[in-house]
Image (cartoon, helix red, strand yellow):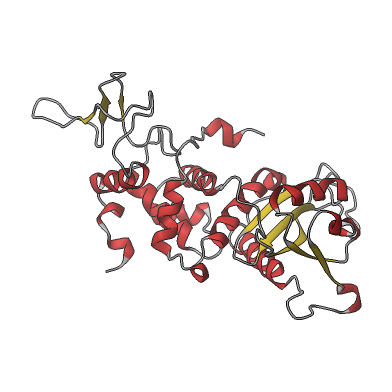
Amino acid sequence: MSILSRPYFHDEEAAFAKLESVVWPNGAICPHCGGYERIYKIKPSLEKKVRIGLHKCGQCRKQFTVKVGTVFESSHVPLHKWLQAIFLIASSKKGISANQLHRTLEVTLKTAWFMGYRIREAMRQGALAPMGAGGGTVEVDETFIGHDRTIRPKGRKKGRGYHHKFKVLTLVDRVGRTKSVVVGDLKAKTLVPILREHIAHEARVITDEAGQYKHLYRDFAEHQVVHHNRGEYGRGEIHTNTVEGYFSIFKRGMKGVYQHCSEKHLHRYLAEYLAEFDFRYNERIALGVDDDERGDKLLAGIVGKRVLYRDSSAG
């Protein structure tokens, strides 16, 4: 049976049951007071129509559904369409555009855009355990994308080099995890604290020959360098091919799916898109996570991340 033929993608009651099983695996919890012992479900009757999934807390006497306190709160989009959107975004290798969601889900383009924004917010995984723990290998590299108008305004000649572009620092643990950060510059005083925060002291760190990484041997057990300027692309296990492979997926997704994201708004969306690609890379099939499991992990990340339209549209 196809995953998309499952009841919770088409039936609202089944969709609420699915979400409750993920958010409340041990039973309903009141989002207002945190109570869980005196929770009961309000059932409809012939005289009274009741919202699907409505519960009431016997402790604080407030009503709620499983959507309260999540990215779905106050949304008028049917929950089963939200679950369809989550599966489509989670199962696509390089992302899915708002226009495609608009056509597939039969919602307005504005609604599809905001759904995608909320779902990518749920993909934000927060702090990960230190990479390279136990002496593992972590590759570090940076890439450049777009045009940062705060550095070189429109109308001025861009020139050669990367200084006018947005700068992205990415760390890839060969266990399979990645962490990407938008940085203001590539100076050692900017990058090294980020590496210290996310990489274990006992790790082996591999970078290219860039000067900002020159003294990493002081902070980590081992620092190996790949000399690209000499035509070297690796010495056995000493290479940055993994992180460069991540960049190729990220850039193909940005150019192929989000090609209509204008440079004017790129600075606002870049961290959001990086969170999406980091999540998909960290929960990929090569690590034993199938599309169904990835969707459930995304659903588990919706709690405590309510996003208002004014938050996402603010300049």
Would you identify the image quadrant in which residue 44 lies?
top left
Relative to 19, is 111 on the left or the right? right
Nearer to me, 245 or 89 = 245
Q: Name the residue located 78 percent from the left edge and 53 percent from the top edge.
A: 167
Q: Is residue 28 above or below residue 224?
A: above
| 5 on left or right of 216 | left
Which of 291/217 is in front? 217
**Rendered position, 234 above or below 213:** below
**Is residue 49 visible to the viewer in this orientation of the structure?**
yes
Q: Quadrant of the N terminus?
A: bottom left
210, above or below 57, in the image:
below
Task: Evaluate whether residue 146 shows in this view.
Answer: no
Residue 47 occupies quadrant: top left
Most foreground residue, 204 or 279? 204
* Quadrant showing the C terminus: top right
Q: Give the image location of residue 123, x and y in percent.
A: 53, 49
- Counting from the top left corner in percent of width and height, residue 63 is at 29, 24
Q: What is the number of callouts on the image?
A: 0
At 41% from the left and 39% from the top, the residue drawn is 72
Q: Give residue 206's position: percent from left, percent from top.
A: 78, 66
Q: Residue furthest left?
A: 46
With 124 as the anchor, is 223 left or right in this view? Answer: right
Q: Nearer the viewer, residue 140 or 278?
A: 140
